[in-house]
Amino acid sequence: MSLLTAARATVVIDVDSMDPVVAATHAPAVEKFSDMTSNQAIACFEALRPERSDVLDAAVHAAKAESAEVLDEEHTAVLALDHFTVLLAKSVFPYVTGRVHAQTSPSAAYNTEKTIAHAKRLVAIFEKNGIAKDRVCIKIPATPESLIACQYLEKIGIRTLGTCLFSVSQAIAASQAKCLYIAPYFNELRVHFEPGVWKEYTDTARDHPMSQVIANIVRTYREIGSETLVMPASIVTAAEVGPPLHGRSLRTLMWTSLNRTCP
């Protein structure tokens, strides 16, 4: 039994990769992933791969067609990234039973209106590509302004995830906004890109600085009866998967983590 199979026995596993090969390798027919998570860093990494050139060309073509009347290269580039994100998600979609995720721009994290507009645009692109709104979740940085956006989006039927979340206060605010998920970062994002940053602990649950934060979030959610699901992100090793948490217990694993847990 692989570590991935063992983890699936106690928690729900999401794939933090936009590579259909990774998803297919680690998601046999009887053990598909729940959701596919993503962010701009993952999408940009995929854009640099030669085998993604056809997808990138299709995204650029769609963006140019959509912005034909707007002579702004930066605007077209942003649209192209949105289309590229959705097309990659579409390729992973057959390997998940739940939702595919796309993230609003961090540059708009402190602007409620821009965050709402971006979320709506992403959902519209998903729907044009045959993925219904009820199979989509929009990841949004958990700033005060963006959590107001989450509250509005939830009211109109667009499900959200509060990301860039590091504290109990952010988690409470996300719950009040009725976010479907929150994704407290277990490790800094840069541990996946900068060698030597990640630190291994003898007792991860006791010694890792985010372990207690996430435990406090879970305890608080239980006390207030929150329906928001906790999805710890930026997990590096199987030891960080940990025990079940609040409600339907979730973990999101990057392709590097998947390869370590199921070589």
Image (tube, rainbow, N blue to C red):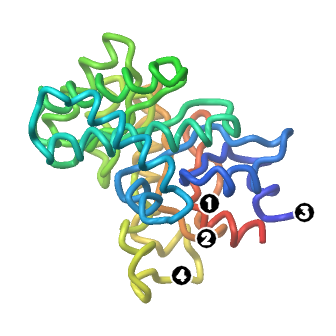
Q: CA distance from mark 3 to mark 4?
A: 24 Å
Q: Identify which residue, 162 or 61, lies in the foreground.
A: 61
Mark 3 neighbour class, 10 Å CA radius: few under 14, some 14 to 19, many 20 or more: few
Residue highlighted by disc 1: 241
Q: Residue at x 83, y 46 (%)?
A: 28
Residue highlighted by disc 2: 237
Q: Secondary structure at mark 2?
A: loop
User: Label 1 near label 4: C-beta < 8 Å?
Assistant: no
Earlier sequence position, callout 2 versus callout 4: 4
Q: Is residue 178 shown above or below 255?
A: above
Q: Identify which residue, 144 or 22, lies in the foreground.
A: 22
Residue 150: x percent and y percent? 27, 27
Q: Is residue 263 left or right of residue 222?
A: right
Q: CA distance from mark 1 to mark 3?
A: 16 Å
| 4 or 1: mark nearer the eye | 1
Q: Is residue 194 shown above or below 19?
A: below
Q: CA distance from mark 2 to mark 4?
A: 11 Å
Residue 202: x percent and y percent? 59, 83
Earlier sequence position, callout 1 versus callout 3: 3
User: Label 1 near label 2: C-beta < 8 Å?
Assistant: yes
Q: Which mark is on residue 201? A: 4
Q: Residue at x 56, y 60 (%)?
A: 51
User: In the rendered image, is residue 162 in sight?
Assistant: no
Residue highlighted by disc 3: 1
Amino acid type, label 3: Met
Earlier sequence position, callout 3 versus callout 4: 3
Earlier sequence position, callout 3 versus callout 2: 3
Mark 1 neighbour class, 10 Å CA radius: few under 14, some 14 to 19, many 20 or more: many
